[in-house]
């Protein structure tokens, strides 16, 4: 088994030596350059059979075990290839949800197009449904064989570039908040859809806001039954199996040279305090990598506990903040002069003020640090859950 | 190793269960010897069990978890040195006695003097390391000065050895052995620390669940939940690093030292906050919190502290991250 994995590693490494894009960051200073890089790298990976290793075996490039997927991701990180930001939601969230909940017709309609490069985004979050996702208010009313959808969605990753959207809507206000949700597949070219990029504080636009104004969605494009949306959404949210944080931790480890270079360039390597902080950070990254690795090993062995994923995410997010913070600190004034960012350049681009601000993406998105701490405390450590209701006490 | 980590962990847990903290020194020492832990790392050809660093990690974590007193770490360093030494007439006899539990000790500090020597008052020999010589010196007739420490689970002494003793290694071999022993010391301290950190964190969480104020358990207050969730996260990551380094035979001294610095920092942070989270009772000797705090701070200082090692690991990482 180990031999087979090592053979795969060598095979992937050789393939990457021939096929991994070089100097790709230089072309990603515009959205057009970013999109072109992402699309061509996805097509190359798909042709090479490495784009969807987590898919079932009947799909080209699919049928890889988690252990094999891990090897592929480690090699992609090692080769410093562009992360598949544009197609990530398509190959993971959309595909996994379709595999689990889609009818044969729905699967036949949508899944092949993902391999051809069709881009999906997620329409879950709303202005008042962030950490509290069940609070979704976007309304879908059934009229014969269509739903008419009205509302607003936020934080749709790559939503402005996407073709399709995984849409969580409210079809009922009766009963528990979760019970009134329904899951739809939305074509973003439908009349009444407006996608507007969200301008992030570091200059990127990785997310969009979606405005839905009397948008018609066929009932045939519903996943699961009406009122089953919460359960379908859970599949979407659990589609990623721990490889991303493993890859990102490895990439952070591999990017330590960027801080070292700044320290040397600025002649700060004689500063013992900085050397210490650098050493402390390197060990913390090692620990995060080891934790991500252990998490995946436990998953492969079926030993994962509820809450383990939160440990990895929290450890990564806090360590990334430390990483970017040290980079920012040692860069001094240099980092304060505005420099153009690299779109899709990863979490560690060496544009330190931008990287530092971008690190908040990991402490807020995908379940904020505070949500992760709740999960760890309640699910892993068995501490009591927050009371569900509260009332403002009357002050005498 | 012939036993899996889980099996060894289970055996260790049975020997030093979670209930009895800082158990009786004499009984603990007898149990450690009886379990065969002192002969763990010695090759089977020399009468040992031939287990590696991972097994040592399990044992030291178990000792740290229960705050077991005694000179186990020092004893294992002496045993390692005897086992590695070129054969000499009394070698097998000394090694056999050490593995059976006759106390032999060594300094746990990185200073040039023989300070921080556990249980020197009852030890027969002391291992003395210098840059070009490793020697085993009989302690009969030595000046042994007790140094009372805050951590009552360790008995430390300053020692002035009476003679040159038996040479175990010289020159490059001595330097290499010295490095290996230092690695082993740092790894043992890291394991002891993470065992202790896990124990005091678990006890703190239990306390938060039991203690009620304002008509609800403290464990319901989000500010407190979030603090222990952070601690759990750093502990889990440090443990993952410990066990990954445990199975990397090629791990360098600096890598092990960085692990030790990290593990002891995590232990300290958890033990310090445990006092705060226990409130008033944490300030008293009625409760166990202070025992963990004292062992955590001593572990931090032994073998070179975090400032010392992080400076070195940082400089090395700066050089290698090219």
Image (tube, rainbow, N blue to C red):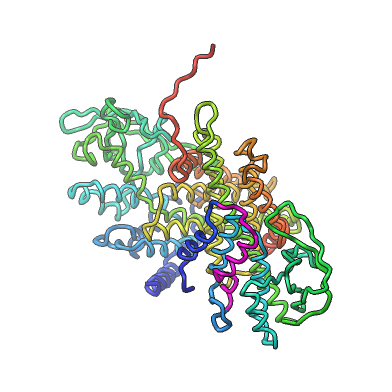
Residue at 39% of width from left, 56% of height from top? A303
Residue A169 x, y percent position in the rendering: 30, 33
Q: Is residue B119 above or below residue A332?
A: below
For this view, does A99 lie left or right of residue A282? left
The x and y percentages for residue A227 are: 25, 34
Answer whether residue B38 is magenta in the image.
Answer: yes
- The quadrant holding residue B47 is bottom right
Q: Name the image quarter holding the C terminus of chain B.
A: bottom right
Of residues B38 and A312, the one drawn nearer to the viewer in this rendering: B38
Residue at image coords 32%, 41%: A233
Q: Give how far across and how far down residue B37 sits, in percent.
A: 57, 69
Q: Quadrant of residue B315?
A: bottom right
How many marks the image carries: the answer is 0
In-image side of B84 versus A227 (left or right) = right
Q: Is residue A157 above or below residue B145?
A: above
Image: magenta residue range: B20-42
Residue B40: percent from left, percent from top: 56, 73
Most foreground residue, A158 or B285: B285
Is residue B113 in view from this perspective?
Answer: no
Looking at this rendering, what residue extends furthest in the left direction? A144
Q: Nearer the viewer, residue B192 or A392?
A: B192
Q: Which residue is pictured at 67% across the width and 40% down the height?
A: B284
B123 with respect to B191 (left or right) = right
Vertical placement of residue A163 versus B223, above or below: below
Q: Answer yes or no: is residue A53 visible.
A: yes
Q: Residue furthest top?
A: A396
């Amino acid at each position: 088994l180990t031999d087979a994995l090592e053979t795969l590693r060598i095979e992937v490494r050789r393939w990457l030596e021939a096929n991994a894009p070089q100097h790709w960051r230089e072309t990603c200073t515009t959205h057009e350059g970013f999109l072109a890089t992402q699309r061509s790298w996805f097509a190359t990976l798909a042709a090479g059979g490495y784009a969807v290793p987590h898919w079932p075996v009947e799909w080209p490039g699919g049928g890889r075990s988690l252990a094999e997927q891990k090897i592929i991701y480690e090699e992609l990180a090692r080769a410093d290839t562009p992360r598949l930001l544009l197609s990530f939601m398509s190959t993971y969230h959309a595909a996994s949800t379709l595999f689990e909940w889609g009818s044969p017709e729905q699967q036949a309609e949508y899944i092949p197009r993902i391999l051809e490069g069709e881009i999906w985004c997620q329409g879950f979050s709303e202005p008042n449904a962030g950490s509290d996702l069940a609070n979704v208010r976007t309304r879908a009313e059934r009229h014969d064989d269509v739903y008419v959808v009205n509302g607003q969605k936020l934080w749709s990753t790559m939503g402005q570039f996407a073709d399709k959207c995984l849409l969580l809507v409210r079809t009922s206000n009766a009963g528990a908040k979760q019970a009134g949700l329904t899951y739809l597949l939305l074509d973003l070219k439908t009349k009444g859809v407006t996608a507007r990029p969200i301008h992030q504080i570091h200059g990127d636009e990785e997310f969009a806001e979606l405005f839905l104004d009397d948008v018609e969605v066929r009932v045939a494009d519903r996943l699961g039954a009406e009122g089953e949306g919460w359960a379908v959404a859970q599949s979407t949210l659990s589609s990623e199996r721990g490889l991303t944080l493993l890859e990102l931790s490895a990439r952070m480890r591999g990017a330590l040279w960027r801080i070292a270079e700044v320290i040397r360039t600025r002649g700060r390597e004689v500063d013992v305090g900085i050397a210490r902080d650098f050493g402390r950070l390197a060990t913390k990254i090692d620990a995060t990598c080891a934790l991500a690795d252990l998490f995946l090993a436990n998953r492969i062995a079926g030993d994962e506990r509820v809450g383990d994923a939160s440990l990895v995410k929290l450890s990564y997010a806090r360590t990334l903040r430390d990483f970017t913070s040290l980079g920012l600190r040692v860069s001094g004034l240099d980092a304060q002069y505005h420099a153009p960012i690299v779109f899709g350049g990863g979490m560690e681009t060496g544009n330190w003020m931008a990287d530092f601000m971008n690190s908040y993406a990991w402490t807020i998105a995908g379940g904020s640090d505070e949500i992760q701490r709740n999960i760890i405390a309640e699910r892993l450590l068995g501490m009591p859950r927050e009371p569900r209701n509260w009332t403002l006490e009357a002050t005498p | 190793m012939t036993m899996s980590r889980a099996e060894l962990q289970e055996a260790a847990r049975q020997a030093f269960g979670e209930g009895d903290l800082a158990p009786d020194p004499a009984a603990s020492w007898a149990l450690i010897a009886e379990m065969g832990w002192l002969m763990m790392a010695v090759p089977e050809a020399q009468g040992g069990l031939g287990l590696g660093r991972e097994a040592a990690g399990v044992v030291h974590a178990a000792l740290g978890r229960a705050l077991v007193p005694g000179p186990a770490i020092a004893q294992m360093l002496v045993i390692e040195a005897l086992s590695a030494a070129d054969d000499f007439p009394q070698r097998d006899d000394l090694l056999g006695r050490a593995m059976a539990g006759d106390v032999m000790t060594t300094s746990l500090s990185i200073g040039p003097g023989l300070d921080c020597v556990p249980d020197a008052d009852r030890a027969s020999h002391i291992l003395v390391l210098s840059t070009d010589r490793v020697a085993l010196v009989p302690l009969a007739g030595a000046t042994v000065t007790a140094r009372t420490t805050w951590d009552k689970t360790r008995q430390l002494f300053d020692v002035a050895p009476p003679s040159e003793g038996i040479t175990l290694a010289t020159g490059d071999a001595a330097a290499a052995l010295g490095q290996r022993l230092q690695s082993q010391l740092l790894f043992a301290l890291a394991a002891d620390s993470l065992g202790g950190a896990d124990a005091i964190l678990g006890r703190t969480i239990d306390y938060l669940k039991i203690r009620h104020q304002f008509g609800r358990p403290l464990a319901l207050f989000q500010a407190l939940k979030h603090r222990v969730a952070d601690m759990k996260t750093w502990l889990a990551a440090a443990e993952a690093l410990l066990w990954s380094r445990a199975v990397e035979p090629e791990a360098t001294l600096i890598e092990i030292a960085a692990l030790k610095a990290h593990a002891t920092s995590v232990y300290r942070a958890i033990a310090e906050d445990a006092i705060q989270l226990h409130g008033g009772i944490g300030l008293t000797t009625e409760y166990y919190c202070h025992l963990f705090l004292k062992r955590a701070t001593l572990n931090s200082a032994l073998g070179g502290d975090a400032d010392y090692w992080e400076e070195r690991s940082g400089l090395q990482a700066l050089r290698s991250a090219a």
